[in-house]
Amino acid sequence: MPTKTIEANGLNLSVLDEGEGTAVLFLHGFPDRGSMWHNQIDAVTAAGYRAIAPDLRGFGDSDAPEGVDKYGLFDLMGDAVGILDALGIDKAHVVGHDWGAALAWITATFASARVLSLTAVSVGHPSAFASAGVAQKQKSWYMFAFQHVGLAEDMVMRDNFAFLQNWGEGGEEQQWAEDLSRPDRMTSALNIYRANVPPESLLAPERMELPPVPVRTMGVWSDGDDALTEAQMKNSADFVGNDFRFERISGISHWVPTAAPDQLNALLLDFLAS
């Protein structure tokens, strides 16, 4: 898919921009890039929407600033809003997966004037995640491991990225290895964990105090997700001030957009049109 470079929030960001009509902003997670949404981009553009899918800072072909402090979710939210500004888009539906879902929750909360609706795939509201109990903390073991600079990079890259090859489902694994093999890109990708989930946040708090999400929201979770519990998505309803719709996909791992594109596309198109 052809990309364009957009200057936003002081960075050069690689962005897919396809179709015409009401905009749908797709936000990917670790260790992806914007093109991982290709099945959803095809579906929404065929339905008359405009699809915007950036490579987040530190990922894909976008700039990767140095320093953990450059990867906070509010910095990434500034990038997302900056992309909308640069493209002359007032409001967009926002769809996120993995870290992109966490970013989508923050954007829908603190930049709600720019958001028509929110679709969060796999990752629930930050407060629901924080209060999901011991089961979620056990599933989050790798977030602790990713805090260790150098050791984490070696763990993920060892044996030709065997960690990711064993972790993935949906065909993006080779793209991950190519992206993360570039100098310093493994560290920039891991910095999203280091900036937003320091170890004490995984051990201590049971709730994050955030304003309620004021836009209509759909949460999509898959029962084969080894990293995230159903509770952290279903309980997101407690933190949405508007209608919350929960959808459960069976037999699929964490990588819903690429492993179950037809099911996700059907849910997404129905939700966007509702």
Image (cartoon, grey):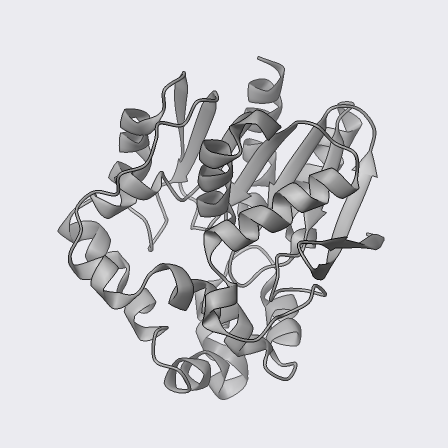
Residue 250 seen in this snapshot: no
Position of 146 relative to 52 (above/below): below
**Of residues 54 and 137, the one drawn nearer to the viewer in this rendering:** 54
Marks counted in the figure total: 0
Q: Position of residue 194 (x, y in %)?
A: 39, 68
Query: Is residue 180 shown left or right of residue 163?
Result: right
Q: Position of residue 13 (x, y in %)?
A: 72, 58
Q: Position of residue 46 (x, y in %)?
A: 79, 28
* Residue shown at 36% from the left, 20% from the top: 241
**Of residues 267 and 82, the one drawn nearer to the viewer in this rendering:** 82
**Of residues 192 and 137, the one drawn nearer to the viewer in this rendering:** 192
Position of 24 relative to 142 (above/below): above
Query: Is residue 126 shown left or right of residue 100?
Result: left
* Residue shown at 41% from the left, 21% from the top: 245
Quadrant in the rendering for residue 23? top right
Q: Position of residue 94 (x, y in %)?
A: 58, 34
* Residue shown at 60% from the left, 21% from the top: 272
* Residue shown at 66% from the left, 56% from the top: 55
Looking at the image, the residue that sits furthest to the top is: 274
Position of 237 relative to 37 (above/below): above
Looking at the image, the residue that sits furthest to the front is: 10
Residue 32 seen in this snapshot: yes
Quadrant in the rendering for residue 154? bottom left
Query: Is residue 131 shown left or right of residue 14?
Result: left
The quarter of the picture where the C terminus appears is top right
